[in-house]
Image (spheres, rainbow, N blue to C red):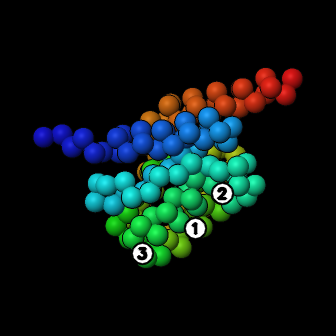
């Protein structure tokens, strides 16, 4: 029997969060954190709304998951995020000791992998490319719309 709660299913949940960010005129990045095949945290970028440069989807999701679990470490959890985490978010994921990070699109300019894959905790498994095209499309659409509005 095929498990309906797979990486594609949970990445679709993160894409829904990215769409919420898009609607708020935020850079459309969404994240969910899963434990035992259950979404325990949902978040999207809120940097504009909160006027806080640290209000990335990943940071928001880590905080929500820690509150849900009542623990600072996210052992046994997986984060699904539409864009490769930046250096700041990779550092936060390191400190959370999350088991796995799955991202859709690579961030060729600011992604953590550009700097060093060792930014993640040594026991964290990192997977990428899940629903890559969908994740890239929403970002491209957002920035195309931004460029048109500034002309």
Q: Residue at x 65, y 39 (%)?
A: 24
Q: How many numbered discs sit on the rendered protein?
A: 3
- Mark 2 and mark 1 lie on one chain; the one further toward the N terminus is 2
In this view, the mark in front (1 or 3): 3
Q: x, y (%) of residue 122?
A: 47, 70
Residue placed under numbered mark 3 in the picture:
70
Q: x, y (%) of residue 43?
A: 52, 52
Alpha carbon distance from label 2 to label 1: 12 Å
Q: Residue at x 49, y 63 (%)?
A: 64
- Mark 1 and mark 3 lie on one chain; the one further toward the N terminus is 3
Q: x, y (%) of residue 63?
A: 53, 66
Q: Classify residue 108 by image quadrant.
A: top right
Q: x, y (%) of residue 26?
A: 67, 42
Rendered image: mark on residue 55: 2
Alpha carbon distance from label 1 to label 3: 17 Å
The quadrant in which the N terminus is found is top left
Residue placed under numbered mark 1 in the picture:
92
């Amino acid at each position: 029997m095929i498990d309906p709660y797979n990486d594609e299913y949970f990445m679709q949940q993160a894409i829904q969060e990215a769409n919420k960010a898009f609607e708020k005129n935020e850079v459309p990045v969404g994240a969910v954190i899963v434990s035992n095949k259950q979404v325990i945290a949902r978040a999207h970028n809120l940097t504009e709304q909160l006027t806080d440069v640290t209000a990335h989807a990943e940071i928001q999701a880590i905080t929500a998951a820690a509150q849900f679990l009542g623990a600072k470490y996210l052992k046994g959890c997986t984060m699904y995020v539409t864009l490769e985490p930046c250096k700041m978010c990779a550092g936060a994921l390191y400190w959370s000791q999350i088991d796995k990070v799955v991202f859709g699109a690579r961030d060729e300019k600011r992604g953590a992998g550009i700097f060093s894959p060792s930014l993640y905790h040594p026991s964290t498994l990192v997977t990428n490319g899940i629903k890559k095209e969908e994740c890239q499309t929403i970002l491209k659409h957002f920035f195309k719309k931004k460029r048109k509005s500034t002309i």
